[in-house]
Image (tube, rainbow, N blue to C red):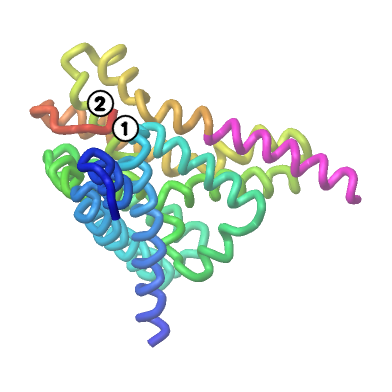
Amino acid sequence: MDMFMEYFWAFIIGGILCAIGQVLIDLTKLTPARILTSYVVAGVILGAIGVYEPLIELAGGGATVPLTGFGNLLAKGVREAVDENGLLGAFMGGFTSAAVGVSAAIFFSLIAALIFKPGTKVNNNA
Amino acid sequence: MNISNQEYGELAKRVSPPSAMAKTIPMAFVIGGTICVIGEALLNLYGALGLDRDNAAALTSLSLIFLSILLTGLKLYDRIAQVAGAGTLVPITGFANSVCSPALDFKTEGYVLGLGAKMFVIAGPVIVYGVSASVIYGIIYYCIKLFSA
């Protein structure tokens, strides 16, 4: 039962975070690039004021997979780096905690772009 | 109620959401929720394999990014995105797609200024504002620690 609730909350919270993004797209004409940027910055703020960790406790992947989770990771990294290295840590923690996600996205994209052929553009992300 | 047709039209437009939204929002919810459930399943899998919480989360992100980029290369991700909207944009898979998609599309303009530079058309601003926000938070956090100690 615990297992079920875990997946239930992951689905609900993850779904709500995506639905909010869709409402913003439909109502405000915010471009996807601005949505992604806003989500990461919102995640940093929510992580900084301490409300994002409880959400992760509840929803697990439902809170870490959306880009707000990436923002929270930046905040967490900075907090730990400042604890360890003082003010210098403010300039270390963000990249340290974002390293895996950014490196993976860059490296796999390079490989994919070398292997696959450019297709017809159906992408509306820009 | 005694209102003109024109007033009624304006009223109706204000209270009823565009019919498209009745479809786009549930689709974003269901598909976004499903991607998060896949993430949760991977988290549990890597946890069961003995990774600690932070490493399991990092490997989950890496796996989702890999899958997203594979599907982008196969032209499947954008097809899902057409029905999912923000459901495929908001998860980390959407970030990976935003890196891979322009890299692929601009490959024809060269490997340095095409593929290499255009990769960051969307990821660039995300990193600029995300990292800057984290630096500001770090400075504030440092000051709070300093004065409360």
Q: Position of residue B109 (x, y in %)?
A: 20, 12
Task: Let me know if residue B145 is in the magenta part.
Answer: yes
User: For the residue carrying disc 1, how many other residues have a C-alpha within 10 Å: few (<14), some (14-19), or many (20+)?
Assistant: many
Q: Residue, x 27% and y 47% (percent of image)?
A: B3
- Report the chain holding disc 1: B
Horizontal side of residue B92 vs A40, given as left or right: left
Q: Residue tagged by mark 1? A: B99
Q: Residue, x 33% and y 35% (percent of image)?
A: A32
- Report the chain holding disc 2: B
Answer with the quarter of the image where residue B98 lies.
top left
Q: Position of residue B108 (x, y in %)?
A: 16, 15
Horizontal side of residue B102 vs B139, given as left or right: left
Q: Which mark is residue A36?
A: none
Name the foreground residue: B76 vs A37: A37
Q: Amino acid at mark 2?
A: Pro
User: For the residue carrying disc 2, how many other residues have a C-alpha within 10 Å: few (<14), some (14-19), or many (20+)?
Assistant: many
Q: Residue tagged by mark 2? A: B102
| Residue A83 visible somewhere in the drawing | yes
Answer with the quarter of the image where residue A64 lies.
bottom left
Q: Residue, x 66% and y 52% (percent of image)?
A: A49
| Residue B66 visible somewhere in the drawing | no
Q: Residue, x 43% and y 47% (percent of image)?
A: A67
Cβ atoms at labels 1 and 2 below 8 Å apart = yes
CA gap, disc 1 and disc 2: 6 Å
Of all residues shown, which one is farthest toward the bottom?
Answer: A1
Secondary structure beneath dot 2 equals: helix
Q: Which residues are magenta?
A: B130-149
Position of the N terminus of chain B, as image quadrant, is bottom left
Of all residues shown, which one is farthest toward the front?
Answer: B2
Q: Position of residue B126 (x, y in %)?
A: 45, 33
Secondary structure beneath dot 1 equals: helix
